[in-house]
């Protein structure tokens, strides 16, 4: 399979089309976090509804992204990439038109199917097309540009949400997707592995989809029905069984969607473990930081989006440079120091209490955002390069699919588990806050029923004017206590990611043939 130089005309078209399509998917996630408060009010969504809106997309992405990578390797990377983009922008337009939570969740499923075909295609196209000496630099460039657009998402999302136009977060994907489709159709040649004659692993796709769906449903039901209810316990148990069946199927299959032999490479295994832990912590941390800024700290949604600008600036200036250094010196040191630094940033953010609003940003949230951004800037490109370099070229689509699946699966588990934990933490803190208040049993019950809405909890109408402000303060204090706990667990996951790099990742290791 012939490769091209990064700065050649063909190389530039591959990079631009891959960046546009990837940015479209990633901007969706970051911008959506910022507009969630507006969306919650507009669609009258509960806290649990918000996590389903996030998870419907992530769940389909995590379930199908492995088979999306394998389809690209077999049927043609450009062809599958383009199919994914088309489905994604169709789902995006439908999301923008949705008038209810149920319809929005359904359309997010369509987006997830498109993303599963699209996201592994971008990295696979780069890895199989750009010559190996420039691969780290190419991935660093991809990381930097996609992150710039991605982190610009909160600013755009905040501006649109404040103007009452949160639906345009979904519509904005359409022109991006059309531009990428035109470039791919006329400027990029087809690339596929001619030696790959295997079929597709549909049993594997079905079992992992069912396993993840049941586990996610189980965790999301815990706040409403309790840990020991049959809905929660039964769903979690059934989900674990399906995941075990998935592993068994992959061991027996002649053409597995997740070839287990890839994991015999220590660097590949370590990089994917690092990805799982770091992105679980990052996803939960960014979500709860966004909710905290708008619902508790009094930021507008635009101001909330602007708080992530230091992160964007660091990614612009460092990610490509870090990719080049990883090419020369190996990724190991970057993948130890980067996640540890990101974990430290999340830990710093956990100590921020109630503030007076954006005027105090520079002395409260800014240091943590800066350290978090620094850590991620030194991690993203070396991590992706380490994954792609640890396997041979004809596994590039599968390897990209596995690593992206780890990112999305971690997001599913983070949203489900941290969503349940946040409600439990919030309820516990709120219970303590209202203990000394002179309230009736009915009033206490109605106050506690609002815990499922987290930062959007409203003072019940039954509360008298004399106690409304006290209850409002209790909601704020309860959410900040829950936020602090979530951020500290997120930080621990970042440190755990660094530990995976220390134990497993080597600078030079040959992947499976």
Image (cartoon, helix red, strand yellow):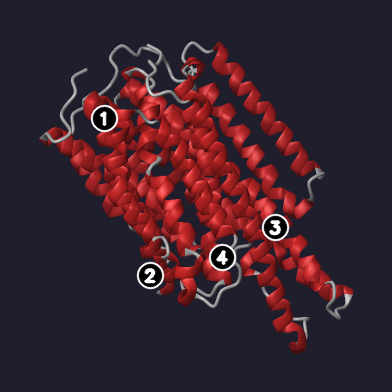
Instruction: Please name the residue that numbered disc 4 is placed on.
Output: 292
Q: Residue at x 50, y 27 (%)?
A: 270
Q: Is residue 169 left or right of residue 447?
A: left
**Front one among 449 and 377:** 377
Residue bearing the label numbered 1? 135
Q: Secondary structure at mark 2?
A: helix
Q: Is 73 left or right of 338, judged from the image as shown?
A: left
Graded by Cα atoms within 10 Å as few (under 14), some (14 to 19) or many (20 or more), the crowding at tag 3 reads many
Separation of residues labelled 1 and 3 (CA atoms): 44 Å
Dividing the image into 4 quarters, which one contains the C terminus?
A: top left
Residue 69 visible to the viewer: no
- Label 4 SS: helix
Question: For the residues marked 4 and 3, what is the alpha-carbon distance in whole angstroms?
Answer: 14 Å
Q: Which residue is mark 2?
A: 159
Q: How many marks?
A: 4
Dot 4 or dot 3: first in sequence order is 4
Q: CA distance from mark 4 to mark 2?
A: 18 Å
């Amino acid at each position: 399979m012939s490769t091209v130089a990064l700065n050649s005309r063909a190389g530039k078209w591959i990079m631009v089309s891959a960046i546009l399509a990837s940015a479209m998917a990633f901007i969706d996630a970051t911008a959506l976090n910022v507009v969630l408060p507006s969306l919650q009010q507009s669609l009258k969504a509960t806290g649990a509804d918000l996590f389903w809106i996030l998870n419907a997309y992530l769940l389909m992405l995590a379930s199908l992204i492995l088979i999306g990578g394998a389809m690209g390797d077999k049927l043609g990377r450009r062809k599958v990439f383009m199919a994914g983009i088309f489905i994604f922008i169709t789902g995006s337009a439908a999301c923008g038109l949705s008038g209810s939570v149920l319809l929005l969740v359904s359309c997010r499923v369509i987006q997830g199917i498109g993303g599963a075909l699209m996201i592994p295609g971008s990295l696979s196209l780069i890895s199989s097309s750009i010559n190996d000496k420039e691969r780290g630099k190419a991935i660093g460039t991809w990381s930097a540009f996609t992150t710039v657009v991605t982190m610009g998402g909160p600013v755009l999302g905040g501006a649109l949400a404040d103007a009452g136009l949160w639906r345009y977060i979904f519509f904005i994907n359409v022109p991006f997707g059309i531009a990428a489709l035109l470039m791919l159709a006329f400027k990029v040649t087809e690339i596929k592995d001619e030696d790959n004659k295997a079929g597709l692993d549909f049993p594997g796709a079905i079992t992992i989809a069912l396993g993840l769906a049941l586990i996610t449903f189980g965790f999301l039901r815990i706040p409403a029905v309790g840990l020991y209810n049959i809905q929660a316990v039964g769903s979690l148990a059934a989900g674990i069984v399906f995941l075990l069946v998935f592993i068994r199927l992959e061991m027996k299959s002649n053409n597995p969607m997740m070839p287990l032999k890839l994991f015999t490479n220590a660097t590949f295994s370590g990089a994917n473990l690092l990805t799982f832990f770091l992105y679980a912590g990052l996803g939960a941390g960014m979500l709860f930081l966004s909710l905290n800024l708008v619902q508790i700290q009094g930021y507008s949604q635009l101001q909330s989006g602007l708080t992530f600008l230091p992160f964007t600036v660091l990614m612009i200036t460092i990610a490509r440079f870090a990719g080049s250094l990883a090419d020369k010196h190996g990724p190991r040191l970057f993948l130890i120091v980067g996640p540890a630094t990101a974990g430290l940033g999340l830990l710093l953010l956990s100590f921020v209490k109630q503030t007076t609003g954006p005027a105090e940003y520079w002395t409260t949230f800014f240091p943590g955002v800066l350290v978090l951004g620094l850590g991620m800037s030194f991690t993203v490109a070396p991590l992706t390069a380490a994954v792609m370099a640890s396997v041979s070229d004809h596994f590039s689509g599968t390897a990209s699919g596995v690593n992206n699946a780890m990112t999305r699966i971690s997001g599913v588990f983070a949203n489900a588990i941290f969503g349940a934990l946040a409600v439990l933490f919030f309820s516990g803190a709120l219970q303590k806050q209202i203990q000394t208040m002179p309230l009736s049993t009915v009033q206490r019950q109605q106050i506690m029923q609002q815990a499922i809405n987290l930062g959007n909890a409203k003072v019940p109408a039954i509360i008298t004017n004399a106690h409304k402000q006290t209850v409002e303060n209790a909601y704020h204090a309860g959410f900040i206590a829950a936020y602090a706990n979530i951020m500290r667990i997120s930080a621990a996951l970042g440190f755990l990611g660094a530990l995976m790099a220390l134990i497993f990742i080597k600078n030079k290791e040959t992947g499976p043939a």
